[in-house]
Image (tube, rainbow, N blue to C red):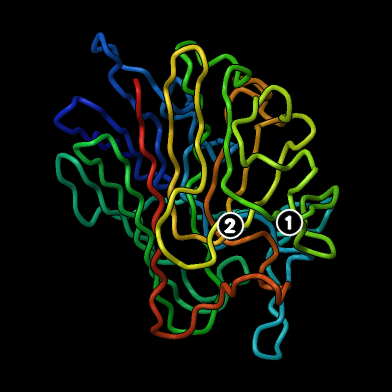
Amino acid sequence: MKSFLLKNSNNMQVEVLNWGARIVSIRVPDSSGTHVNAVLGYTEQDEYLNDPYNMGSTIGRYANRIANASFDLDGKAVELSVNEVESRSHLHGGFVGFDKKYWQVENATENSLELTLKSPDGEEGYPGNLTVSSRFELTANNQLILSYSAICDKTTVANLTNHSYFNLTDDQQSIDTHDITVHAERYAPLDRDHIPEEPYINQVDNTIYDLRNKTSAEKVKKAICNANYFVNNVSEVKEIALLTERNTGRQLRISSDYPSLQVYFAEFLKTPFKPFQGICCEPHYAPNSPNIGLYASVLLRPNQEYNHKIIYSFENF
């Protein structure tokens, strides 16, 4: 397992592991020069080898859930591994997703890192030999840019994201002092297994899911728990969410060209973490998209290139 430390001219530092192409720390200097870590992580590096929470990792081939671990592809049924037994769903790429693999280092500089991975035809049930790149770039204005690209030799599905748990406080004990804003008018109603259910797209108006104005995480964390929002229908990088820590004024702006955003208040974290200790804001395609025609297509045709970006902007530290 190798660790890479990215730095910028402001002495902001991002640590990335080649195991799972995962972010293990994002240290932003405050006004006194003291580093504030903006994400949850383990104390010891070896703990990531048996991490059940996908802490900071790159998720693939398919982030989130696919119902019944299957989908139709050009008239043929594709059967995936079932790693959520009770719901018989396929979650985050299966038993050995991209978060549980060593990635190859392609290029490393002081402020950037590119990692690649080859996923063979049939892995976890997915068709095609898929080659994936995950690039991390730390800019001079305290932005962390994640760039994902992929190409496959057969028609397949692809959905990549980062699974960091954010907490902008000094002690990282709770998210209760955070406000969240999500720039979305629509969301996917989810059933008890966190799979979209009909009508598949609802308006946020007059519901607990309306986060268009700053909303206290403490007030909505249990009621929402886990939700998917439709944030982008123009395929361009734009701001989709904002996290603010009220006591310090620290902010995280999240921008992306992905069509949806998964917001998870980390209710199911356990030792060494605690429930509701972090907030996941994961831009990607909506859960179960291969089975829902209303959603943006996740199909990746042979020699078609998959390209998406996520930008985390850290402000007022």
Q: CA distance from mark 1 to mark 2?
A: 10 Å
For label 1, the residue is 188
State the quadrant of the C terminus. top left
State the quadrant of the N terminus. top left
Question: Residue 18's spot in the image, x, y percent?
Answer: 35, 45
- Amino acid at the residue labelled 2: Ser
Residue found at x 50% / y 26%: 244
Question: Residue 79's spot in the image, x, y percent?
Answer: 71, 74
Residue 313 sits above or below residue 31 on the image: below
Residue 257 sits above or below residue 78 on the image: above
Q: Is residue 17 left or right of residue 55?
A: left
Residue found at x 53% / y 33%: 165
- Can you tell which mark lies on residue 260? 2
**Label 1 vs 2, first from the N-terminus:** 1
Q: Is residue 135 left or right of residue 304?
A: left
- Amino acid at the residue labelled 1: Ala
Q: Is residue 191 left or right of residue 77?
A: right
Asked whether residue 100 is in view, the answer is no
The kind of secondary structure element at disc 1 is strand
Determine whether label 1 and label 2 are within 8 Å by CB: yes
Residue found at x 34% / y 61%: 133
Badge 1, how many Cα within 10 Å: few under 14, some, many 20+? many
Q: Quadrant of residue 8?
A: top left
Residue found at x 81% / y 58%: 88
Question: Residue 34's spot in the image, x, y percent?
Answer: 28, 11
Q: Quadrant of residue 93?
A: bottom right
Q: Who is closer to the viewer here, 128 or 7?
A: 7
